[in-house]
Image: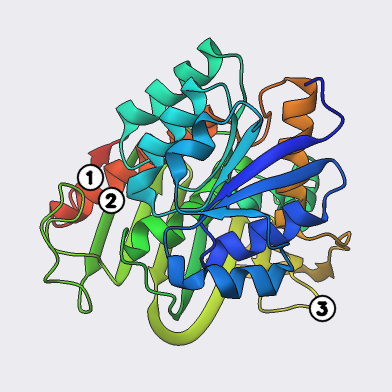
Amino acid sequence: MTRDRIRLAQFGVGRWGNHLLRNFLALAAVDVVAVVEPRRDQHEAIREKFQLAPAFNLTTDAEAVLADPAVDAVAIATPAATHYNLIKTALKHGKHVLAEKPLTLDVAECAELCQLAADNHVQLVIDHTYLFHPVVRQGAAVLSEQPLGTLRYGYATRTNLGPVRPDVDALWDLSIHDIAIFNHWLGETPIAVTAQGQTWLQSDLPAEPLFPAGLADVAWLRLFYPSGFEATIHVSWANPDKQRRLGLVGDRGALIFDEMQADAPLVIQCGEFTPDGIYFIPTNLSQEAIAIPPGEPLKQVCEHFVDCVVQQQPSPISSGQVGTGLVKVLVALSRSLNQAGQRVAVE
């Protein structure tokens, strides 16, 4: 990068794109020069919300913006099925790319995009926001001290009444967060998975290879790691009981990340068994809330992307390769779900 400020164009100003645009407009190192939003009827509201000047380039013409040599980087917050073509075109034009998760819906496409970024000497970063969450980062630091003893299993629940996506199912939309956290904390990736689910709301959509029965509204997943660790995940966008809870359990305690506990989202609950004849007595019981530094995760994602562009260095946290690895897991989970829960290897 030779410019003092990165000239960035954003694609998509939907629910998540609103948050991305807000953060990029606030960064001193970024000059947002264009916004591409195909819903023309939303343009006036976008201008008003973000106080964009009348001359600001708010357009539906993606091709023109991608071909503009004055644009250094793009942020993509569009439906998952559109990612491949947009990212591929951007990379071919020498643009650095920050893409909303998932990278694409196909492993081969992900690998192609990673190679294309390397060939064109530009950065491809994926917005796996939880990897930048202060709780997740602090959790990794805590786990490095091995306070839980030998890790045994993990669990996660991510439910709410919406938002319902029309492009991917609840499995792809929601479980990717918890899989990313488990992988990050464990330092390994699943070798096999199982999944079962149900579809109620969008069962009459045109059949897609990943979603032949429509978009699942609820799913129950199991992840099998090479170390022998196993994790279970429950996701649903059709459950009024909002939960955002993930835990790792060892033989000496558990580390629990509960977003619904704003005052103490990260807690260590210690406890182990002491044999007493034929019985096992819980001992060394305690609970400790872990102090969490302040910070908006998405702001840190945007700042990290800028650093990667300025330093011309691949992301050590959420690179295209990390995104590809997560897509591999999701594809295997979809195959299992479509095969009534059969165990599927992650390839």
Q: Amino acid at mark 2?
A: Thr
Position above or below: 311 against 180: above
Identify the element where label 2 is drawn. strand
Which quadrant does the N terminus fall into?
top right
Which of the labelled discs sits on residue 263, or is there none?
3
Mark 3–mark 1 CB contact (< 8 Å): no
Q: How far separated are the C-alphas under marks 3 and 1?
A: 39 Å
Q: Nearer the viewer, residue 86 or 3?
A: 3
Mark 2–mark 1 CB contact (< 8 Å): yes
Which quadrant does the C terminus fall into?
top left
Q: Earlier in the sequence, mark 2 or mark 1?
A: 2
Left or right, 4 with respect to 183, comes to right
Q: Among all residues in the image, which is located at the extreme front?
A: 55
By what rule are the colours in the image chosen?
rainbow
Q: Which residue is mark 1?
A: 343
Q: Amino acid at mark 3?
A: Asp
Q: Among all residues in the image, which is located at the extreme bottom?
A: 240
Q: How far separated are the C-alphas under marks 2 and 1?
A: 5 Å
Of circles 3 and 1, the one toward us is 3
Q: Residue at x 12, y 56 (%)?
A: 212
Q: Amino acid at mark 1?
A: Arg
Q: Earlier in the sequence, mark 3 or mark 2?
A: 2
Q: Which residue is mark 2?
A: 194
Q: Nearer the viewer, residue 255 or 75?
A: 75
Identify the element where label 3 is drawn. loop
Q: How far separated are the C-alphas under marks 3 and 2?
A: 34 Å
The residue carrying pointer 3 sits among few (fewer than 14), some (14 to 19) or many (20 or more) residues within 10 Å by Cα, namely few
Where in the figure is residue 173, as x and y percent of width and height? 42, 59
Identify the element where label 1 is drawn. loop
